[in-house]
């Protein structure tokens, strides 16, 4: 099957901040650490230029913010995207592609985190799958609420 090229083009992905720490168990007799029992917090912002021809995604992802045993991870990244100028896109199409851009940031962070934790004491940490639709819905709701 021939793959069709997307009108969404990734121009750059970069890590702006990266903290990764392994916090050992308090109980010295415990030999394993539950890596996936910790909360994952994701905050992001999308900035679209005036002509709506490109956009940036800024993302902060924190795993185990309470610094319980296991990995504490705090990363910030940004990704720059633009839309293929030869493809005519309506606003709904662009909104769907922005959704894809947010998803691509999470996927890129998943690979980055798996890579850096593969060199650490505990097992490699593979970020679980994130319900991006729920994440975007929560972000839209957050924007609707008045600032305190």
Image (spheres, rainbow, N blue to C red):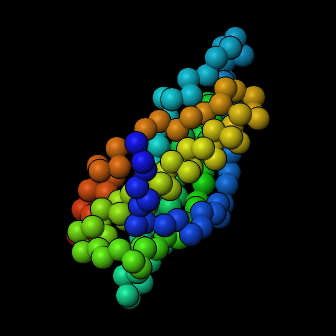
With respect to residue 97, does 114 lie above or below? above
Please tell me which residue lies in front, 146 or 91: 91
Q: Residue furthest top?
A: 29
Name the spot of residue 7 as percent of width and height, x first.
Answer: 40, 67
Residue at figure coordinates x 43%, y 50% from the top left: 3
Q: Dividing the picture into quarters, in which one does residue 65 lie? A: top right
Please tell me which residue lies in front, 49 or 21: 49
Q: Dividing the picture into quarters, in which one does residue 102 lie? A: bottom left
Residue at figure coordinates x 30%, y 76% from the top left: 88
Please tell me which residue lies in front, 101 or 84: 84
From the viewer's perspective, tell me whether residue 32 is left or right of residue 91.
right
Name the spot of residue 43 as percent of width and height, x first.
Answer: 44, 59
Residue at figure coordinates x 56%, y 28% from the top left: 35
From the viewer's perspective, tell me whether residue 86 is left or right of residue 14.
left
Residue 137 appears in the picture as rendered: yes
Residue at figure coordinates x 35%, y 63% from the top left: 97
Name the spot of residue 50 as percent of width and height, x first.
Answer: 38, 88
From the viewer's perspective, tell me whether residue 16 is left or right of residue 10.
right
Q: Dividing the picture into quarters, in which one does residue 145 lie? A: bottom left
């Amino acid at each position: 099957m021939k793959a069709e090229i997307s009108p969404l083009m990734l121009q750059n992905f970069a890590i702006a901040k990266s903290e990764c720490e392994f916090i050992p168990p308090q109980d010295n007799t415990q030999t394993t650490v539950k890596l996936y029992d910790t909360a994952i917090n994701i905050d992001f912002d999308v900035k679209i230029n005036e002509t709506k021809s490109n956009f940036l995604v800024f993302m902060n992802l924190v795993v185990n913010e309470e610094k319980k045993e296991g990995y504490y991870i705090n990363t910030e990244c940004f990704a720059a995207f633009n839309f293929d100028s030869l493809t005519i896109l309506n606003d709904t199409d662009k909104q769907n592609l922005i959704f894809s851009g947010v998803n691509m940031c999470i996927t890129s962070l998943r690979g980055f985190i798996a890579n850096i934790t593969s060199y650490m004491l505990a097992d490699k940490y593979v970020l679980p799958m994130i319900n991006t639709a729920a994440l975007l819905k929560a972000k839209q709701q957050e924007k609707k609420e008045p600032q305190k």
